[in-house]
Amino acid sequence: MQTHVQRIEKTGGPEVFSFVGTALPEPGPGEVRLRATAIGLNYIDTYHRSGLYPIDLPAVLGSEGAGVIDSLGDGVEGFAVGDRVGTFTTRGAYATHRTAPADQLVRLPEDVSDEDAAALMLKGSTAAMLIEDCARVQAGQTVLVYAAAGGVGLILTGWLKAIGAEVIAVVGTEAKAERVRQAGAAHVVLHKTEDIAARVREITGGAGVPVIFDSVGRATWAASLDSAAPRGLIVSFGNASGPVEGVNLGVLSGKGSLFVTRPTLFHYATTPEARQRYVDDVFAMLRKGAIGAEIGQRFPLEAVAEAHEELEAGTTVGSTVLVP
């Protein structure tokens, strides 16, 4: 059958995408064929496109999507044609139809729409991993969240609030400040006009924070070091401003015997059971009202270059969904 995909032949800016039709073979052993219904856009997609995270080329990007199974390969058990499923750990989602390994699928509940699933699976599972398994945040802790009005940031903020943590949210505009307050942030720092570390120290009475979720990278590394409490944990999980380089381990000692980790979801969601657990936790938080899909914008799959431009420019709010 025929599928239409957003393909890149080389790395670079958003202009490297080409929307092309191509033949899609029948699913092989252990695979299924999916008809896409909604596709999630994530910052990691820009890293693959730019070459910051090297991948084999040519490639179809995108790790997150919801769809319907329309064909099964040999040996697939536990799924049937017509099942609603999602994927968030295997590339190739920027497509109208695709094949995927059956062991990478998660089941979608009836009360969660395809668009909400596509907006939440990867970002929500990332938040679940960061809070539950990486930092193991406890009720009563104060947590600094960068880019708190973004897709992962809003989920982190609402989730942390729901478990009893206090969030200091870093955003760039008053409009985004109001949005994160609605999501559950107790304090907001406007990074364009305020010194982040100075404000964090002011808010915490000079103590600093025990946990920092930093998705920005290079531009905020110094502020994160200066915001951490003694023996605090800096979780650097993104590179929106570029990667953190040249880390001097002696600085960690000088700043209070700090801990630093650079996690990726794919080192935590390593089994079908772990992947399903994460999305189940995400949907449970959605049902509680602690988090929302927060779809701020939609783009047709044909306009993925424009979607990437807006994401990198920081003009998007919440999650972005591509419509096949």
Image (tube, grey):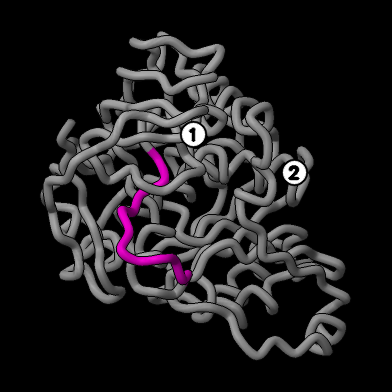
Please, is residue 71 above or below residue 156 in the view? above
What amino acid is found at the position of numbered circle 2 in the picture?
Asp
In the drawing, what numbered circle is on residue 133? 2
Please, is residue 310 above or below residue 132 in the view? below
Question: x, y percentage for residue 215?
Answer: 52, 63
Disc 2 secondary structure class: helix
Please, is residue 256 above or below residue 274 in the view? below
In the drawing, what numbered circle is on residue 101? 1
Foreground mark, 1 or 2?
Answer: 1
Question: x, y percentage for residue 161?
Answer: 61, 37
CA distance for labels 1 and 2: 25 Å
Image position of 181 (left or right of 263)? left
Mark 1 surroundings within 10 Å by alpha-carbon count, few (fewer than 14), some (14 through 19), many (20 or more): some
Residue at image coords 58%, 36%: 159
Q: Quadrant of the C terminus?
A: top left
Quick check: is 71 in the magenta stretch?
A: no
Question: x, y percentage for residue 270?
Answer: 67, 41
Residue at image coords 69%, 77%: 225
Give, as a single range, the part of the protein colored magenta. Answer: 53-64
Q: Quadrant of residue 44?
A: bottom left
The dominant secondary structure in magenta is: loop
What amino acid is found at the position of numbered circle 1 in the picture?
Pro
